[in-house]
Amino acid sequence: MMLSERRSLMSTIAFSAVALSGCNDSSPESPVEGNGTAKQATISRGVDLSLFAQGAFSQAPKIVDCETAEGTATTCYELATSGAPAGREPGPFCPRTTRDGAEAGGAWFSKEGNGDLVDITGEFILKLSDYYGDENWLVYDAKTNKVRYTATKEACLGAARPDVEAQYQQNCIECELSYLDDDFSLTYLIPVTPIPADKPGRVRTVGIALDGSELAGPAPVDAILGSYTIAAFDDCGGHINAHQGYHYHSTTGCTDTSDKSDDGHAALIGYAADGYGIYAMKDAQGKEVPLDECRGTTDDIRGYHYHAASPSENMFIGCMHGETVRQAGASAGGPPEGHQGPADGEHLPVAE
């Protein structure tokens, strides 16, 4: 198989259980509460295509036959994307000198693992040893005060992976959309009707944001920090690699939009792989609602839906409430989230 074919295969992401464009209201049989028990059936509103940004899809969505990992035959919407966020240019990511302010760099998880992201300023790079309590950090040249960053495609491919190549350790990692293959694309298969699962499923790839970018599973923070690298996000909480294109590990409001209900509910940021909406953590009054173990809840307007975690928690949701599409070529019981690419995406090497 040619390298471009392998990358195309790795870049095909099968998702499950989303109803698109608000044209399908369904009644799940047994949504799961936080303790794993069934509760009374509620509606599922489904995805509203009109809420996606213009240009989010690289071709018109269509309906195809599909099957979930649990063996449920259903129909899915097929969504193709280009790996770039619609309507904006990603970045900036890494500052260039230790004197640069917040405007020159992006953001990263806080060491506390909750709350907002921290700005990657020149001072942040300069004081990484203090921040992480490890004197081995040195992501800059002490003579020139220039920040070490991945300035080429080769460096991006060598560093944006769990097993960072030795020559790219002690770097701030940033990649460009121009590094993607010319024919790069991602395909999401999303069933027209969400199907509540018998038990919550684990999460790798979470879903799709309203700008067409992937809502990714947890970043491998231990591997990143263990290689003395910072996999810089832009201020929207996303970054780029060769397998997922631009993708989010955090939500900071860049894709938020009203779901047209006008009831003060938290803004919609995208849709999960199982078809349920993912909303911001807090509503218009800055309040949070009680959630189950998957970070989900139910109301009369939206049915079951999720609320995202805080930006630095390295997660969007806690588990999958619904069934997800069977991975192409996989046996029953394959990845419940139906991801055909690398486990986190974060960035397993391509086999030669």
Image (cartoon, rainbow, N blue to C red):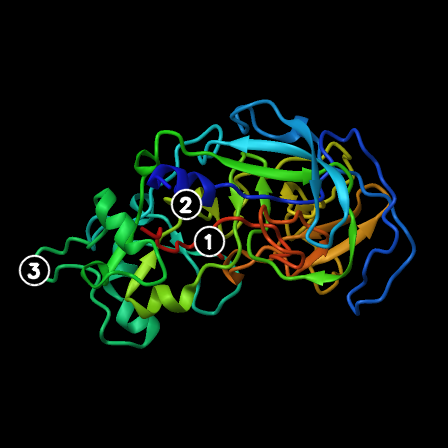
Q: Quadrant of residue 167?
A: bottom left
Q: Position of residue 224 (x, y in %)?
A: 35, 63
Which residue is more in the foreground, 99 or 164? Answer: 164
Q: Which residue is mark 2?
A: 243
- On screen, residue 177 versus residue 188, left or right, reads left
First in sequence: mark 1 vs mark 3: 3
Amino acid type of disc 2? Answer: His
Are the residues at dot 1 and dot 2 in contact (C-beta closer than 8 Å)?
Answer: yes
Q: CA separation, marks 3 and 2?
A: 36 Å
Whether residue 236 is visible here, answered yes or no, is no
Q: CA separation, marks 1 and 2?
A: 8 Å
Query: Which residue is at 83% across, 56% downward?
Result: 31
Q: Is residue 192 shown above or below 200?
A: above
Amino acid type of disc 3? Answer: Lys
Q: Is residue 78 shown above or below 112?
A: above
SS type, badge 3: loop
Circle 3 packing at 10 Å, graded few (<14), some (14-19), many (20+), is few
Q: Position of residue 6 (x, y in %)?
A: 40, 43
Q: Which residue is mark 1?
A: 342
SS type, badge 1: loop
